[in-house]
Image (cartoon, helix red, strand yellow):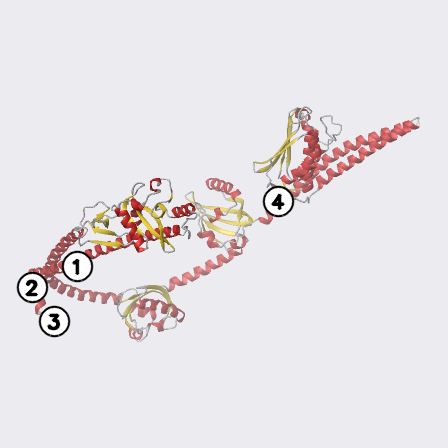
């Protein structure tokens, strides 16, 4: 039976205009109350703001007065029991430095300013007698003496200029008044420190006053025309100076200005709400008819839904969310599971789910019940009536609104058994292919030709480079970023060229492995094209590091053998030439000995033979040194400080340097180290410095300059002299030959430069010479 509407509600429903007017009066009264409360709140906020401003200024002034008192007290402690200040200037200087707001500090024995710091700018105050000052000064000084506390005179015009306040602390020695310890603060400094600034606040102004003890009238020290007795003002007193500080609201109508907009908005909102209510009530009658029409349509729609539910080409069921009981089910789901409608509705949903999928289903359904999710979409297995396992794509949707108690839910099941079987076959096939790929002795990969990204990488990448396949595939430009820096430009150029030429890539490069080791890779790449455009790359990376190391070792061995053969061949020429010369001399002297007619001639030939034999022995010794240098493979190489070895060599030649008055300029940095053989370095430096001293110019004192610098990434030692020089056009090709001399020096053997060159080259370096006849010679040694 339809429920009749209440009489009162019917009255409002059928009289929309009267209802709207009553509602208008109600809202207008409510807005008036809100405006009144808001005005009261504005007034309280103003009072609170004034109090906060006063509190902040009061704290700042109190802190300034405390600091001034501390300064005056510290200054007073400089006065001893005899009334004589000790170290006044030093103490005063420190006090002024630590308290920059103070203009000056004073000691005023018997009321006369005898001590003041700083004196500069305050000269007029010195010897000022307070008791001969204006009556107000005398009166305020006596206040401090009577109270025995620090009292601040002013604001007053200062003798030294400006306006300020003077704080005086009376001092008593043996209970007898001695004088004052005083501080002087400029008024503008005091106001700035306290935060008293009428430009700081838009709606508030300060006023600072003091009652004149002579006239008993209140004097104001800030320009203002405001009434400080208004309701929107507050003040505080400072007894240390009998000051009074006001803060007044200079914009009392700002609250009304804000309220006017609220009042206008409220009136507009009230009128609009009343109008809308009137329209709403009018629409209500129209909606009653509409509801009746919709009810009829809903019945028709429900009938159609039932028809769709029963004949849908997908399984649908309604389940009790609390018990799991099947409440409704369509024919498709019955056929899918092999049950009749009655048989299926007699079961709980969990009894037909495959046991291994129950735990996952339970977790998802708990989330659905708790409101964490509003729908679940999963694939799960079901058991048919005959025990066969089938797959379904399941969508579960609750039929209760958020925040309501769970009631029932809809389960929609799509048969995906065939697709899952095909997927299993495909997965098994992929696993077999991946297993085969991962057994290949190389990194099988597939990627994009445009951005150097990988879409597949075999697990072998972890064995060869230490990186996971995910790193190779998921991090952009990972492969290119881990190329060896020296190979990046070459590889990029090769890839660009091979892509254009439409040919298979087969190239070698180095990569930096995860453990920072260098791995040589041979990359064989096939370019897959569609419409003559590269769309995919497939390849295999083969680790050829061991092969490269073997090639490198073989090349080094070949180079070493070739170099040794060259040196030994050159040495055989030297041996053949030098020994032939000595053997010819011995043979000739032997013939002369046989043909000598007198004993004196024979003895002379024998002495000559000894000389030749000694020369032969020296030659063999020198040749042995050359053999040692040229055939040494495992030469001990260690880090050597070049500067230290130059100093050591110069100390060895110290006598010659002094004898020739030579100047040696050692400009080599003290921290330069080279990897070299210790004995070779000593020998090379001895030979070069010895030659620079030996072949100095007879007309000038020797100057030897030694420097070390970097040239094309290679460390170079340069030794220059101003000696007699060498004609390189004439002797350049013989410069480093054995037994080559060029200056007619009787001590010259022509072996030192030959040995030095062999030693430098044995260490992988080279030696060069620049020389001008009668100007000097420069040797440059390039270290490896």
* Foreground tag (2 vs 1): 1
- Mark 1 / mark 4, whichever is N-terminal: 1
Q: Nearer the viewer, residue 153 or 585?
A: 153
Which residue is denoted by mark 1 in the rendering? 37
Q: Disc 3 to disc 2, how far (Cα)?
A: 18 Å
Q: Contact (CB < 8 A) between labels 4 and 3?
A: no
Which residue is denoted by mark 4 in the rendering? 552
**Quarter that holds the C terminus:** top right
Q: Disc 4 to disc 3, how far (Cα)?
A: 103 Å
Is 464 placed above or below 306 here?
Answer: above
Q: Is residue 24 left or right of residue 212?
A: left
**Quarter that holds the N terminus:** bottom left
Residue drawn at (83%, 31%), measured in percent from left and top?
A: 611
Is 686 placed above or below 81 here?
Answer: above
Q: Is residue 489 left or right of residue 125?
A: right
SS for dot 3: loop
Q: Disc 1 to disc 4, how far (Cα)?
A: 94 Å
Q: Contact (CB < 8 A) between labels 2 and 1?
A: no
How many C-alpha atoms fall within 10 Å of the one at disc 2: few (<14), some, or many (≥20)?
some
SS for dot 1: helix
Q: How far across and how far down the image is residue 95, in percent?
A: 39, 48
Q: How far across and how far down the image is residue 479, in percent?
A: 48, 48
Q: Can see residue 588?
A: yes
How many C-alpha atoms fall within 10 Å of the one at disc 4: few (<14), some, or many (≥20)?
few
Which residue is denoted by mark 2 in the rendering? 14
Q: Nearer the viewer, residue 579 or 379?
A: 579
- Mark 3 / mark 1, whichever is N-terminal: 3
- Mark 3 / mark 2, whichever is N-terminal: 3
- Mark 4 / mark 2, whichever is N-terminal: 2
SS for dot 4: helix
Q: Contact (CB < 8 A) between labels 3 and 1?
A: no
């Amino acid at each position: 039976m339809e429920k009749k509407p209440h009489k009162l509600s019917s009255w409002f429903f059928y009289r929309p205009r009267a209802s709207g007017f009553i509602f208008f009066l109600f809202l207008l009264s409510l807005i008036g109350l809100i405006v009144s409360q808001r005005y009261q709140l504005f007034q309280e906020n103003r009072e609170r703001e004034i109090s906060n401003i006063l509190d902040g200024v009061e704290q700042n002034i109190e802190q300034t007065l405390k600091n001034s008192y501390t300064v005056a007290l510290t200054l007073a402690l400089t006065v001893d029991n005899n009334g004589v200040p000790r170290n006044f200037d030093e103490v005063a200087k420190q006090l002024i430095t630590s308290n920059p707001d103070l203009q000056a500090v004073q000691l005023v024995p018997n009321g006369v300013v005898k001590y003041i710091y700083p004196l500069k700018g305050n000269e007029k105050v010195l010897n000022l007698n307070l008791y001969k000052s204006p009556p107000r000064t005398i009166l305020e000084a006596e206040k401090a003496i009577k109270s025995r506390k620090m009292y601040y005179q002013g604001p007053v015009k200062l003798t030294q200029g400006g306006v300020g306040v003077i704080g005086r602390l009376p001092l008593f020695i043996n209970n007898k008044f001695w004088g004052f310890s005083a501080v002087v603060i400029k008024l503008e400094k005091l106001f700035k420190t306290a935060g008293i600034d009428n430009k700081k606040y838009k709606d508030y102004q300060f006023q600072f006053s003091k009652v004149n003890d002579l006239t008993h009238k209140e004097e104001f020290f800030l320009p203002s025309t405001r009434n400080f007795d208004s309701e929107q003002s507050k003040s505080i007193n400072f007894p240390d100076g009998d000051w009074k500080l006001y803060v007044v609201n200079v914009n009392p109508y700002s609250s009304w200005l804000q309220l006017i907009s609220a009042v206008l908005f409220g009136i507009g909102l009230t009128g609009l709400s009343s109008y809308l209510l009137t329209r709403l009530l009018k629409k209500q009658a129209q909606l009653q008819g509409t509801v009746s029409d919709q009810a009829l349509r809903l019945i028709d729609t429900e009938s159609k839904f039932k028809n769709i539910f029963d004949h849908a080409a997908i399984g649908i069921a309604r389940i009790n969310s609390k018990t799991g009981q099947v409440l409704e089910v369509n024919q498709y789901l019955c056929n899918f599971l092999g049950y009749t409608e009655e048989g299926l509705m007699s079961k709980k949903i969990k009894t037909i789910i495959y046991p291994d999928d129950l735990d996952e289903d339970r977790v998802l359904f708990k989330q659905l019940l708790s409101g964490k999710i509003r729908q679940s979409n999963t694939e799960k297995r079901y058991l048919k009536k005959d025990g066969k396992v089938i797959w379904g794509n399941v969508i579960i949707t609750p039929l209760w609104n958020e925040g309501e108690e769970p009631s029932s839910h809809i389960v929609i099941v799509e048969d995906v058994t065939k697709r899952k079987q095909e997927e299993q076959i495909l997965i098994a096939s992929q696993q077999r292919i991946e297993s085969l790929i991962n057994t290949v002795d190389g990194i099988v990969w597939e990627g994009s030709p445009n951005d150097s990204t990988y879409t597949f990488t075999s697990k072998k990448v972890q064995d060869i480079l230490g990186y996971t396949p995910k790193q190779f595939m998921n991090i952009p430009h990972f492969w290119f970023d881990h190329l060896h820096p020296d190979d990046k430009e070459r590889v990029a150029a090769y890839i660009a060229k091979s892509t254009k030429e439409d040919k298979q890539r087969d190239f070698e490069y180095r990569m930096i492995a995860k453990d920072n080791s260098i791995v040589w890779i041979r990359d064989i790449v096939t370019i897959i094209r569609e419409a003559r455009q590269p769309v995919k790359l497939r390849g295999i990376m083969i680790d050829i590091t061991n092969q490269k190391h073997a090639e490198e070792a073989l090349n080094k061995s070949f180079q070493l053998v070739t170099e040794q053969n060259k040196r030994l061949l050159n040495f055989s020429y030297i041996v053949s030439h030098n020994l032939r010369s000595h053997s010819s001399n011995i043979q000739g002297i032997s013939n002369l000995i046989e043909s000598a007619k007198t004993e004196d001639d024979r003895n002379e030939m024998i002495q000559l033979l000894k000389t030749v034999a000694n020369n032969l022995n020296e030659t063999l010794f020198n040749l042995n040194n050359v053999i040692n240098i040229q055939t040494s493979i495992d030469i001990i190489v260690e880090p050597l400080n070049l500067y230290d070895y130059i100093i050591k060599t110069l100390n060895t030649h110290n006598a010659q340097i002094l004898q020739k008055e030579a100047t040696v300029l050692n400009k080599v940095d003290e921290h330069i180290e080279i990897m070299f053989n210790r004995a070779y370095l000593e020998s090379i430096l001895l030979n070069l410095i010895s030659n620079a001293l030996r072949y100095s110019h007879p007309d000038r004192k020797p100057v030897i300059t030694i420097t070390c610098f970097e040239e094309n990434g290679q460390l170079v030692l340069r030794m220059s002299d101003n000696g007699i020089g060498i004609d390189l056009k004439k002797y350049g090709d013989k410069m480093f030959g054995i037994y080559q001399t060029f200056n007619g020096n009787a001590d010259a053997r022509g072996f030192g430069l030959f040995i030095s060159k062999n030693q430098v080259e044995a260490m992988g370096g080279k030696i060069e010479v620049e020389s001008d006849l009668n100007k000097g010679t420069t040797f440059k040694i390039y270290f490896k």
